[in-house]
Amino acid sequence: EIVLTQSPDFQSVTPKEKVTITCRASQSIGSSLHWYQQKPDQSPKLLIKYASQSISGVPSRFSGSGSGTDFTLTINSLEAEDAAAYYCHQSSSLPWTFGQGTKVEIK
Amino acid sequence: QVQLVESGGGLVKPGGSLRLSCAASGFTFSDYYMSWIRQAPGKGLEWVSYISSSSSYTNYADSVKGRFTISRDNAKNSLYLQMNSLRAEDTAVYYCAREGVWAPFDYWGQGTLVTVSS
């Protein structure tokens, strides 16, 4: 099973600040890494697919990068509505797995 | 627009059974793989099971293998999860989600809560 480890677990950030969340895979997964945002009491929403591909309707301040084992989700100029938990997910090898999540709080 | 609506959750005793349903609309259901993903209270996401578009392939997390069975009815645009021998650790919100082949989960339902408790 591929283990995904996110860091940090929690981040408290001021609006307009830049946020960086990392996801490390226990073995190479190419670009088969996706990011989701889950706001309180809502279902997860796909933010970025295949490490860096944007999703229609997702604000351009969200971007992703990386390949192999190291990946990054960047939120440029954080807005209050971005308070949420963020999860990475790999679709390279069964069983599909998720990172443990990163909670982003707005100061 | 794509809609996924889960139902069938509730309170069940340990060792009991429950059948979850997911009604799909707004897309050609028979073209897509589907998955069940769960989230225990206050915890992260855990993939549970997937089924291929024609039901030829299924796969399960080790934590539910032998106890849960995924199925679908393409004529009814519906996905199911039969859960037997339920344990306290199965308590979670269960989401159905659409996926491509080796692709991300691009649409999720709102979830249905399953509580296993005596």
Image (cartoon, rainbow, N blue to C red):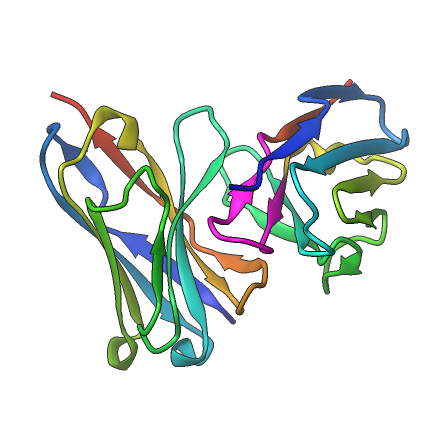
What residue is shown at x 27% (from left), y 45% (from top)?
B65
Total marks in image: 0
Quadrant in the picture for the C terminus of chain B: top left
Whether the magenta-drawn stretch holds residue B64 is answered as no
Q: Is residue B58 left or right of residue A59?
A: left
Eyeballing the image, is A82 above or below A103? below
Residue B11's quadrant in the figure?
top left
Q: Is residue B22 left or right of residue B3?
A: left
Rendered location of residue B33, percent (x, y): 43, 68
What residue is shown at x 45% (from left), y 73% (from top)?
B32
Residue A91's quadrant in the figure?
bottom right
Rendered location of residue A46, percent (x, y): 63, 53
What residue is shown at x 78% (from left), y 18% (from top)?
A107
Eyeballing the image, is B81 above or below A16? below
Rendered location of residue B85, percent (x, y): 13, 37
Q: Is residue B17 left or right of residue B71?
A: left
Residue B23's quadrant in the figure?
bottom left
Which is more toward the observer, B67 or B25? B67
Q: Quick one: which residue is furthest to the front in this view?
A: A27
Rendered location of residue A65, percent (x, y): 83, 48
What residue is shown at x 52% (from left), y 71% (from top)?
B1
Residue range of the region highlighted in magenta in the rendering: A88-100
Eyeballing the image, is A84 above or below B77? above
